[in-house]
Amino acid sequence: MKLRLTNVAFALALAASASGCLTPSGEDFVLRQGTTGGSSFGASAAESDGFQCPGAPNVLPNYDFNLDGTEFWEVCHHPEELPRIRISGATVNAPVVCVYPVEINDENGSISLKKDAATQTLIKKCVTASVSDGYYTKTYYDFYDKDLSFSGILYNAVFIVKQTNTAQMEVCLDGPLGANVNFCPPYSFGRFRN
């Protein structure tokens, strides 16, 4: 299934940008650009294992509700093993996150959702935090160099959402009436490979 991006500004910005993030704005998705450069997480195990890392978060939250740097993700890819990615980031009050692989098509601005051939459900993988730390009423969960592999599919971008929001995210992306950003929970989105 493909989500059609109707916002012309998004299509033009995406073609010029190596990474981007979709944010709901009315009925369309709008680009929110990520950054590239020196590693914000330092030299990671991902880089020493042959992964290529952006050096800064490239999967960004649709809204920065927490205003504390959480929900910003660095997603690394492995140039020789295309199904493999590695994520690093943090959440608040969510020890498990789920990752949905998608493919952004630069030619027409569409996003191809990836579905299981047998069940026709969206493909996702969930990972558990490496460590946690409490602060007042919040518990922060850190995800360092979490390895994921989505065999048999081509993808260049991901949605990351708290596990507690997966049902709502699946309605947002692939509901009975098609994609509808009005049903989206808080999520992070971005491109990690051209």
Image: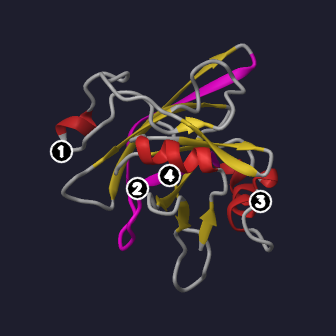
Relative depth, front residue between 2 and 154? 2
Q: CA distance from mark 3 to mark 4?
A: 17 Å
Mark 4 residue crowding within 10 angstroms, few (<14) / some (14–19) / many (20+): many
Is any atom of residue 45 visible in this view? yes
Q: CA distance from mark 3 to mark 2?
A: 22 Å
Say if mark 3 contacts mark 2, CB within 8 Å.
no
Q: CA distance from mark 4 to mark 1?
A: 20 Å
Is 40 left or right of 119, judged from the image as shown? left
Q: Disc 4 designates what residue?
A: 158
Q: Majority secondary structure of the magenta segment?
A: strand
Above-or-below relation of 153 to 74: below
Question: Bounds of the magenta span?
Answer: 137-162
Of the numbered discs 3 and 2, the one sitting upstream in the chain is 2
Q: CA distance from mark 1 to mark 2?
A: 17 Å
Q: Disc 2 designates what residue?
A: 156
Q: Is residue 147 magenta?
A: yes
Question: Residue 39 at x, y = what percent?
Answer: 32, 24
Q: Quadrant of residue 95?
A: top right
Q: Determine which of the numbered discs, if any, sits on residue 180 in the image.
A: 3
Q: Nearer the viewer, mark 4 or mark 1?
A: 4
Q: Determine which of the numbered discs, if any, sits on residue 50 in the image.
A: 1
